Image (cartoon, helix red, strand yellow):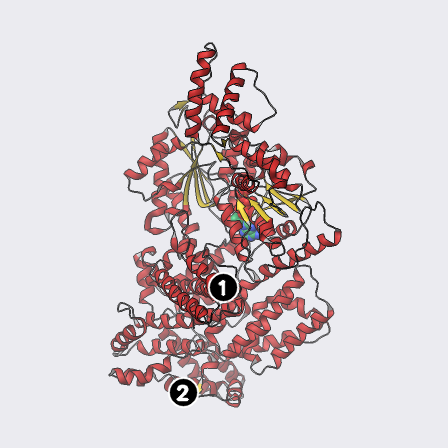
Amino acid sequence: MSATAISTTQQLTLTKDERQLERAHRNSVLQKRIHDGELEMSRWQLLAARNTAHRLRIVASAGAGKTRTLANAIAAAATLHDAKHIAVVAFTRKAARVIDGALADNDVYGASVSTLDSLAVRILEAAGIYVTAITDKEKKAILTDIRKTCMEKQPHERITLKQMMHDTTYYAMHPNEQPESEYLKAVLKEYTERCKNTYSAEWPTIELLAAQHYPKSGFQFEILGVDEAQDLNPTQIQLVESITATTMQTIVAGDWRQGIMSFQGAAPDWFRNGNHFDQTLELPVNHRCSPEIVDAANHVFGDNIKAAKNATAGMTPQLIRANNEQDEAEKITDIVEGLLADGHTAASNIRFLAWRRSQFRELKRTLAERGMPVNEDAFRTIHSYKGDEANIIILMGVSRAVWGDRSDESDMLLYVGMTRARLGLIISYPDQTSLPGGRTSAVCGPYPTLENCGLQEPSDSQTILDRLHHDINSRHLLEDVIEDNRTAQNIAIQKKQQSRIIASYQRLGNAKTAAKLTDCAEKLTFETMTDGNVRRSLLAHAWFCNQKTCNICMGRRAVRNQLRVGAALDCLFNPKCYRNLLPDELYEQITAMQFATPAFFTGTMPNVDDLALGIRVLNFAVRNLTHTDTHHNMSERERVFTQGIVGTTRSDEATNHFINEGLHELEYQLQQHESAHDLTDMQLSGLRQKITDIRAGGEWHVHAHMIFATLGAYYHDQLHKDDITKGHDYKGDIVEANHLYKDHLWWKLEWTSAVQKAVNSIIRQDGAKGITHDDFQTARWQQFMSMSRTDVEQVIEQAQAQVKQCESGTVAYDKALQNEKKAWSNGAVIDIESISVKGHAMTSKQKAQLTKNPALLKSAIQETCKYAFKPDELFAKTSKEELDQIIPQIDATSGARLISRTGIIAQVLHDIDEQQLCDRYLQRTRTGNASWTLEQSITFNWLTDLRQYVQYETNDEDDGEADFLS
Ligand SMILES: Nc1ncnc2c1ncn2[C@@H]1O[C@H](COP(=O)(O)OP(=O)(O)OP(=O)(O)O)[C@@H](O)[C@H]1O
């Protein structure tokens, strides 16, 4: 936390300069995190988050990111203020989690994140007033007693206990109002007395007291954030006002369209009335729901909300017409059964929402009868699910008649319910006057607008299921991958590390640091999600402390990153991981493949489009695993990160160097530029200089295209606009580099179906948005899929024979040469960097020669196969000792070499008997997993290497944890 706190407390207004300083600070904190790929915020959200108006109101429809914006605004502000002067009021668990997460991500600890009620209690305690909230049970006991005595005195007056319970709270919430009834007045007086005697009070009374005593409580909040502000009741509003009187800023976020808490006394008008605020900002885009769901909600409520630009397509929302409760339960259970079949989606992704819990009775019974593994947490009332979200929402009994007589509030319920869904929305409504819950009503059926809003009634339930599978399958294909013992392993490793580090600090006499670390040690366990899903929390919600230098937390981040990437890749390349999720036929196809090579991510992307697609596939997988929204664009940081992974698989240290040095720098500068910090001339020329340096850096021809591919055409054109206009031909260089690379590689994709799936899914998504992948892509895809290795070899042989028959220098010869090149380009993967000559790595001179001479290159590749990888020798060995001498050569740390070797080994193994031997050997020594095939073992090794890289990547990022896991 910075020592340069910007404001003094008890200050109503900041000077203009101070505000500017604050705004600039927030902006820089947010921008950095956005740049680092740790945070995604739209422009609107950013604008709101850095606004420093004293009373700021953020208004937006459901899913527009209010909570996220509020959390990040506060977190950014908190790095400049002392955390103890920050308070955030959240009403839901999810909001508290998001806010906590944002603060932790900014290394801010000690801020107050709580409900307004518990804040009120703390304020009172600080002011020396100790009062506890009366419980319902206590209240009931007191009121029953009072009722008895009062009734004896005034027997003609009668108020039910229920009414009394309600009235006492109401008048506590509205202290300026008085009941007309003398009887009720007497009850209230007596009730207040009794509460006083037991040092207890109604929540509204506590809030009111806190509002009165706040100024002398010693709390001095400079920043106050309030989420779901439409739900504040009058006494809570008074408390907020009282705190705001001395804050530097109060940010209030809400949506009066979601004001469904009036039964608890909420007064949304305060939030709705703009006069209470200095400034109001609106967030216009829904980031939660698929475009289909946004459309449906727009139609029903006559809105014009926009879906996020890159929102993933979901399913068309569906209507179920139910005759009665049982019919509804049966139909919904059919759908659930289909969804859960074959593990297509997890039960934890489905939520059933209704107005009343009693509406679930029949459904729960039917689900249990049919053995559906749906746990209690899946059934939620709309009120309790406010602010939360799930992939699939099944909204039950939608009818004004069922949901209440006040049409405005039941509309809001429908609005809140519909907008909880990310991908799939299924709405059931009663078709007859006998309603769920055993009631009858003259008003039945759905809302008048529901049926005409693009919602479809399924002709048969299978249609829905197919659709759902189709849309959701790709998102959850990867989910269960991480649910193996790695979770346990990693925690154990960390604990070990931790105690070692703590002990070493203690030995050094640094008790303070040791104590801090012990603190982290205690918080080591990963929080379990509300759905009991530990693995998800492991990846997405691990706890990190605020010590920049805390090795434990740094290490933990490394572990998280490793897991993210490792798991994604495991899943893509190791069909075993998703055995249970795949249909038998598909599984067999995948396992029958020679080698699920990671080639797709390696040397097989000789042009920008392919590489970009590869990055997207990998990123898609990572996001799926980490439950990160796949709707929006990949951030540049994410892209470069993924690119880094791709890079290491085919290249050497130099590539990493280029990626880290050149690429991050370029990207960072450009990111700055993009977010309105326009590049100055100095920066621009500095950037150019950097590129020149990269170009001058020896192996640029081999690597440059990767860098530029990562930056993409947009950045490239931006950056070189001037040069291009002036005729400086940067583009030429790229083209040359690409050609060079392409011409001197022979490659063959051996797609796994998983990769195929991811690619198809992306192509499909793009298709839906009107983006088509060029024919090259499609044609090549088809070609790869149709050609076997023997086909490839035959084509190459024929092409070679053709060349031999032609006289050199003739047109026919050139053509034949071209054909031969083309034929080679369908071969296996070999990276030029991995080529060695007779067992020795090439000198740069040799390399240069090779790049100029395709024939030489080809023979070098053949030589490499023989000598560098020694496959023949490897397979000729029979004893463990002998193999031990060979194996280290397979253990190249450089990804490219490993890939090439594995590619070659797989190829050679195709026909040889020794496969069994190696298989067993590798199983035992490398993975300890006897059921793995050689290919899987090798993939495992490859992943191990990759993980090391990811760890380095993390080290760079978090600077300071370098040694933790090494
Ligand atoms: N800029 C963004 N990019 C991608 N996803 C986002 C962005 N902003 C928010 N989201 C995601 O959209 C979803 C809704 O965000 P959030 O809960 O903050 O919205 P909200 O306005 O508070 O919603 P509600 O009012 O319905 O509670 C969350 O899953 C969040 O992670």
Residue 310 appearing in the image? no
Q: Mark 1 highlights which residue? A: 512
Q: Is residue 78 above or below residue 463?
A: below
Disc 1 crowd rating (10 Å Cα; few below 14, some 14-19, many 20+) is few
Q: Is residue 67 left or right of residue 274?
A: left
* Screen quadrant of the C terminus: bottom left
| Front-lying residue, 504 or 918 | 504
Q: Earlier in the sequence, mark 2 or mark 1?
A: 1
Q: Is 48 left or right of 804, judged from the image as shown? A: right
Q: Secondary structure at mark 1?
A: helix
- Locate the N terminus and report the quarter of the image it occupies: bottom right
Q: Name the residue tied to disc 2.
A: 863
| Residue sitting at x 57%, y 16% | 180
Task: Indicate left or right for 483 with 37 as reference.
Answer: left
Dot 1 amino acid type:
Lys
Marks 2 and 1: which is nearer the front? 1
Q: Position of residue 915 (x, y in %)?
A: 27, 76
Residue located farthest toward the top when viewing the structure as drawn: 156
Residue lying at the far right in this picture: please name it. 16
- Where residue 479 appears, as percent x and y from the top left, is 39, 55
Is residue 517 in view? yes
Q: Amino acid at mark 2?
A: Glu
Q: Is residue 56 above or below residue 235?
A: below
In depth, the one of 296 and 284 nearer the eye is 284
Q: CA distance from mark 2 to mark 1?
A: 60 Å
Q: Is mark 2 within 8 Å of ligand 1?
A: no
> Which x, y percent locates residue 105?
53, 57
Residue 591 location, x and y as percent? 32, 65
